Image (spheres, grey):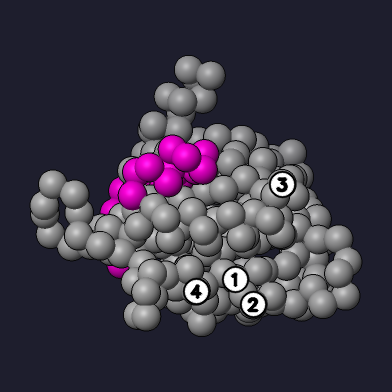
Amino acid sequence: MAHIPNAAGRPSWRASVLTLFPEMFPGPLGFSLVGQALQAELWSLALHQIRDFGIGRHRAVDDTPAGGGAGMVMRADVLAAAIDEARSQNPDLPLLYMSPRGAPFTQDKARALSQGPGVMLLAGRFEGIDERVIEARGITEVSIGDYVLSGGELAAMTLLDACVRLIPGVLGAEESLAHESFEGGLLEYPQYTKPREWEGRSTPDVLMSGDHKKIAEWRRGQSERITRERRPDLLRSKSDG
C-alpha cells in the first residue's frame, strides 16, 4: 500500500483506492489546484494493490465466469481480503465500486461526499467483480456515465476530482463554486473575457454595463436557456422535486 502524502498525520479528507494499477495514481490528481491541495495535505490518498491478496504463486485475482461467457471476473475472496485490509485502516469511509450499472454520480453526491471523512473506491477490471462481494461487504455501485471504460481507475479519478475541488480551501474562491454547472439544477451561463471584440464577435453589452442586477438576471436567463436546450431532464427533475 502507498500513501500520498499526509506524512505528518494531520487531519484531512481521505481517499482510499483499491486497484490493480496503483501506479496510475495520482495521475491528473497530482496537478493544478487539486494536486496542490494534495501536497498541502488538505486531502490524502492511500493506494491498495489488489494483487497483493491474489491466489497462488501468480497472485491470481480473477477466474472464468460461472455459467460460461467471455472474459474473466474478479474473485470475491481476493477482493474481500483487500477490502478488509483497507477498511482496517479507514473503517469510517463509505465504499463505492465504480461500475456502469451503478447509480449516476451527480454534483449533489460529490458535495455530500466532500463534506464527509472521505471515500474508499474499488476500481474493477475485466468483466466485473463477483456479485457476492458486493452483497457481503455492503458496496455501493456508482457510475460516471452511460459508457464502458477499460477499468475503474479513470472513473475513480473523476469522482475524486469532483469531490476534492469542493473541500474548503482547495479552490480558494468559494463564490465561484456557487455559479458552476449543476449548482441550483442549471447548467452554467456563458463566460467571456478580453478582448471585447474577437473575429467579429462581441462580449454582450450587459456584461460591460456594471449593473450587477441586470448581469445576474442575464446570467440566470442564459443558464435556463442552455439547460432547456441541452439538458431538459434537469428541469424536469427540478420540477418533480
Q: CA distance from mark 3 to mark 2?
A: 19 Å
Give the structural element (helix, strand or loop) at label 3: loop
- Circle nearer the N terminus (4, 2): 2
> CA–CA distance between discs 4 and 2?
12 Å
Residue bearing mark 3: 92
Front residue of 20/191: it is 20
Which range is magenta? 130-150
Q: Amino acid at mark 4?
A: Asp
Residue that numbered label 1 is attached to: 47
The answer to whether the residues at label 2 and label 1 have Cβ atoms under 8 Å apart is yes
Give whichever of 165, 53 is nearer the camera.
Answer: 53
Q: Earlier in the sequence, mark 3 or mark 2?
A: 2
Residue at the (55%, 35%) spot, across then down: 185
Instruction: Decide which of tag 3 and tag 4 comes sooner along the chain.
Output: 4
At label 2, which amino acid type do we have? Ala
- Which quadrant of the figure has residue 233? top left
Coordinates of residue 37 in the picture (x, y in percent): 75, 71
Disc 2 crowd rating (10 Å Cα; few below 14, some 14-19, many 20+) is: few
Residue at the spot of label 2 = 2
The disc labelled 1 sits on which kind of residue? Answer: Leu
